Image (cartoon, rainbow, N blue to C red):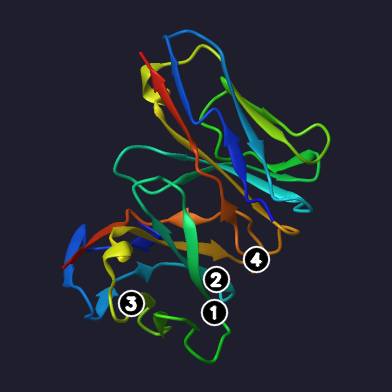
Amino acid sequence: GAGVSQTPSNKVTEKGKYVELRCDPISGHTALYWYRQSLGQGPEFLIYFQGTGAADDSGLPNDRFFAVRPEGSVSTLKIQRTERGDSAVYLCASSLEGGPWETQYFGPGTRLLVL
Amino acid sequence: AQKITQTQPGMFVQEKEAVTLDCTYDTSDPSYGLFWYKQPSSGEMIFLIYQGSYDQQNATEGRYSLNFQKARKSANLVISASQLGDSAMYFCAMREGAGNMLTFGGGTRLMVKP
């Protein structure tokens, strides 16, 4: 079956603009995760959804970042008033039920560049 | 303190030889899981292998095996019979207790020489 998909694959924006990044998880997966990967580093956790609700948003860096998953499937990560430091690859992952032993399957990421 | 430490920024290995990528971790939770992912230049994180803290045997998946030394808090990835397609970044990650996030190390870039 299809894996995790993310759109757009690349996004270039100007400082101060608003962006939305989309994630479509593996069909049937109830758990969805967002991570951010800066150049030369490992991914860092942003937020975790179980179904429609954000079960853990402790990784969001500030209130400019927000994510939704209104129907328990597709999720959108929203960044307001973008800053150059937001430039990174934003990775989405999903797992079947969110259990601690489950593998998280990642999408190809969205490369965000803020000029 | 770093929760996941990968001390080898870059590694070279000759094609068809075995290579070990190091990973040490730090947790006080007795229940945890350790994961290895491969990230080729395309950017996608590909799951390779998993080891649970209560697993009695080292995990193996094809050419990948995990050398799990619990007392030393290390979970090294061993790739046997390296192939050119193994050239990529490799990340070790941990999930603690009932938590849902993965904590990643800084990665090791593996380069396989023909």
Badge 1 amino acid:
Ser
Q: Which residue is mark 4?
A: A102
Q: Which residue bears the numbered disc 2?
A: B33
Q: Nearer the viewer, mark 3 or mark 1?
A: 3
Q: Which mark is residue B79?
A: 3
Share a chain, discs 3 and 1?
A: yes
- Whichever of callouts 2 and 3 sits on the residue coming sooner in the sequence is 2
Q: Tell me the residue that label 1 is attached to.
A: B53
Tell me: B68 left or right of A41: right
Q: Split into 4 quadrants, where in the image is the N terminus of chain A?
A: bottom right
| Secondary-structure class at tag 1 | loop
- Check chain identity for marks 4 and 1: say if they share one: no
- Would residue B18 appear left or right of B3 to someone viewing this image? left
Q: Residue at x 28, y 75 (%)?
A: B82
Query: Residue B77 vs residue A20: left or right?
Result: left
Front one among B102 and A90: A90
For the residue marked with disc 2, what is the amino acid? Gly
Determine which quarter of the picture holds residue B43: top left
Badge 3, how many Cα within 10 Å: few under 14, some, many 20+? many
Say whether mark 2 and mark 4 are on the same chain.
Answer: no
Q: Are marks 4 and 1 in contact (CB under 8 Å)?
A: no
Taking the spot 64% from the left edge, 38% from the top edge, the residue there is A57
